[in-house]
Amino acid sequence: MGKGIRLPTSERRKSRGNSWSRGKGEPGLIGRKKVDWSIFEEGTTIPQNVVQFFSRANDGRMPERGEVFYITLVVDEKEYKAELHNKKRQGSDLTQIRYDSNKELRQVFLEQFQRSYAYIKPERERLLAMGRKPSVVVPDPIAEYLEFHETTGPFRYHVELVHFGGTLPSESKCSRKIRSVDWRSARCEIK
């Protein structure tokens, strides 16, 4: 998938809530992660039904419970170090890609996914102020994604940044007449 390509919901298979998906018939695609707050902080948890595709990309190898493997994420032809964790969790394993100590990669995601961050941050702060769990899901019409693709070697993934493919209401032809922008629904209200 190229940058700026919007993925119609009908072409996606949801793997866990609105967070991970995997298109049908896309060779080399491991999985597609919708940008959420964790992307800007520490990394992402990989749902069990997507772990199998990471395992395939790693020649059938994954960290055992309690193990950590070092991995390479290739973003825009630059390599970033990260870790693939298999954490102990009651009843099952919890597989994660972690890069919380890689400030450079976190900064790349902040710069590249400014629209998602601009939506998530105030919503998260609003929920926290209300004493609620700060779980914010970016609506599909304005969502951005990380696509993890296989490479020629195990534990090395090409990560493509899929940006919002349309225009935000404030950038549309009606922008001169906009009274307000509702980021939660990606609609503009015309005067």
Image (cartoon, rainbow, N blue to C red):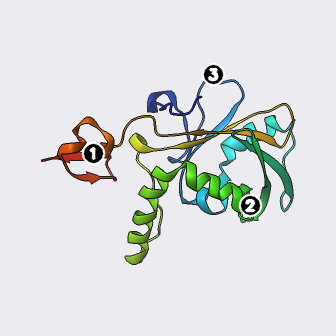
Q: Which mark is residue 25?
A: 3
> For the point 47% across and 70% down, which residue is it?
133
> What x and y, as percent, mark residue 63?
85, 52
Label 2, label 1: how far apart the Cα atoms are: 35 Å
| Residue receiving disc 2 | 102
In the rendered image, the quadrant that contains the N terminus is top right
Q: Residues within 10 Å of mark 3 (few under 14, many from 20)?
A: few
Q: Nearer the viewer, residue 164 or 77?
A: 77
Residue 95 seen from this side: no
Between marks 1 and 3 in the image, the one whose residue lies nearer the viewer: 1
Q: Amino acid at mark 2?
A: Asn
Q: Residues within 10 Å of mark 1 (few under 14, many from 20)?
A: some
> For the point 45% across and 34% down, which residue is it?
165
Task: Give the structural element (helix, strand or loop) at label 1.
Answer: strand
> What x and y, as percent, mark residue 17?
51, 48
**Residue 13 drawn above or below residue 168:** above
Picture quadrant of residue 20: top right
Task: Give the structural element (helix, strand or loop) at label 3.
Answer: loop
> For the point 67% across and 42% down, which residue is it?
49
Q: Amino acid at mark 3?
A: Gly
